[in-house]
Image (cartoon, rainbow, N blue to C red):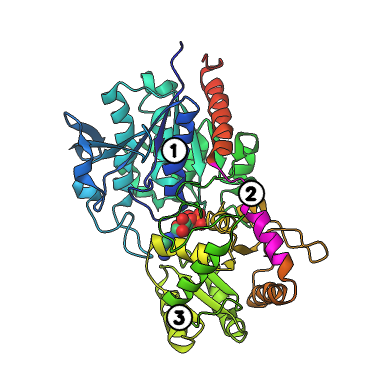
Amino acid sequence: MAPPLKVLFVSSEVAPFAKTGGLADVVGALPKELRALGLDVRVAMPLYAGMPWNDLEVLDGMLSVPMWWGAARGRVRVGRLPDSEVPVYCLEYNRYFDRPYLYGPPAEGYSDNLERFTYLSRGALELCKALGFIPDVIHCNDWQTALVPIYVNTVEWMQPLHGAATIYSIHNLAYQGIFDGNALFITGLGREHYNPGELEHFGALNLTKGAINHSTLLSTVSPTYAREIQTGEYGCGLDGLLASRSGDLVGILNGIDTDEWNPATDRHLPARFDAKSLGGKAQCKAVLQKEAGFAIRPDVPVFGVVGRLTSQKGFDVLAHALGRILGWDVQLVLLGTGDPDAERFFAWADGNHGDRFRAWLRFDNGRAHRIEAGADFFLMPSRFEPCGLNQMYSLRYGTLPIVRSTGGLVDTVTNYDEATGGGTGFMFSTLDPDSLANTIGWAVSTWYDRPHHIDQMRRRAMAQDFSWARAARAYHDLYLRAYQRRRGHAFAA
Ligand code: ADP
């Protein structure tokens, strides 16, 4: 039997080991599905503080990673993605990664992030050589790994790794890895690569631009976002470049981890439920109301919000609409961390409307599950949304999403049709406090006036298939296409 397609994922976060957002969920789940399709998939990431160091096996020998100042020698520890055989190689280099945060304190990046993720990118390639694992495809994710396709094309020239096809996945184009042009030396790349056809963008070093120019094929996490980022409104300055590679850019909707997010088995919930028996959901709602310190009332609609408090997520718009929303007989719970001004505002609102608004300003996975399960509606007024996972969790938990029509939200939610009761959620397009409040008002009136529609939508939402199996097949096709492009012949399985 011919050997399977060999794929290395490189990522700065991988659930459950280290997570700040949706990227970690993707790299925690997709490799398992690809493995189930028969691919030899492995993952490389940094070893951060807070990871289960002692549960990881220490590999013999030291990895030597060329850095601008000399060879950085670090250990490699290996674990597995839960319930799978997928190896996760964790690059240990304490000077870079043994810190309280993955990227830096809230709203700041560590000043040496370029150096830290140069280590990850270069280290992932050195790891392959040390393991004797020469991947057919290297799947890179966001700017922290954007140097990988460039190294494959440059420092690996005439070496086995030069044959690897590279996929660059854009999980969020707002984070591009932009640094002062004078910092180029840290990457080890020569000045000849600092030009507009490679890494230079309006006088700065832009790692994402470099990856878009150097990767075999490109992907992003939903079909709508793939189209949007080729426009001036969403392209964050790279729309022209992305449009020039339009034929090489595909949008593949993320799946969700249907084991971790399954209302029928979820260990974080006080009661479990499915589309056939929703009694457990009512119990989850009561417990959520109790945790929030609200009146325990089945008749009042509960709205949930979970996410990073950043301008991307439209929390500023929610803040402006909050007074109007809380004027109605509703309850609203928010879980999130991020922008200090937003945190201050929501803490203040929590103090002033304690009977109907609760803000939990921390990261709490169990609570995220209990909000998804216990709420009736889930708010995502995103300014842009590459894919979004929370709306898919909501649908699966029978919690109807109220979303702005952008990015992956368009690809996953269908708008309510008052005439037929069709749809799985509520959508609006103009991002302003009135549109948001009006749409929430529309949901509230539907709740009271047409409860049978809510019931129908809930069951329809819960029947959607957002498993990774579908996405994994699409990535497999993409890998085979990239292989063919890189090598000039098809992969012989
Ligand atoms: P993004 O990746 O842009 O942050 P997504 O919706 O794709 O947004 O994914 C966010 C993920 O992070 C979800 O799994 C969500 O539940 C989780 N999350 C975000 N903030 C918090 C928080 N404060 N507590 C718990 N989970 C959170």
* 245 sits left or right of 39 in the view: right
Crowd around label 3: few <14 · some 14–19 · many ≥20 (10 Å): some
What residue type is disc 1 on? Cys
Crowd around label 2: few <14 · some 14–19 · many ≥20 (10 Å): some
Instruction: Give the camera-side residue of 95 and 115.
Output: 95
Residue 456 on the magenta span? yes
* 6 sits left or right of 490 in the view: left
Query: Which element carries disc 2, helix, strand or loop?
Result: loop
Q: Residue at x 49, y 87 (%)?
A: 353
Query: Which element carries disc 3, helix, strand or loop?
Result: helix
Q: Horizontal and vertical percent for residue 182? A: 34, 48
Q: Which of the marked residues, 1 or 3, is nearer the chain's N terminus?
A: 1
Q: Horizontal and vertical percent for residue 470? A: 59, 37
Residue beneath disc 1: 140
Disc on res. 381:
none
Residue beneath disc 3: 345
Q: CA distance from mark 1 to mark 3?
A: 37 Å
What residue type is disc 3 on? Phe
**Nearer the viewer's eye, disc 1 or disc 3?**
3
Residue beneath disc 2: 464
Which residue range is magenta in the image? 453-467
Q: In which quarter of the view is residue 199 placed?
A: top left
Q: Residue at x 59, y 58 (%)?
A: 277
Q: In which quarter of the view is residue 346 placed?
A: bottom left
Q: Is residue 93 visible?
A: no
Crowd around label 1: few <14 · some 14–19 · many ≥20 (10 Å): many
Q: CA distance from mark 1 to mark 2?
A: 29 Å
* 83 sits left or right of 63 in the view: right
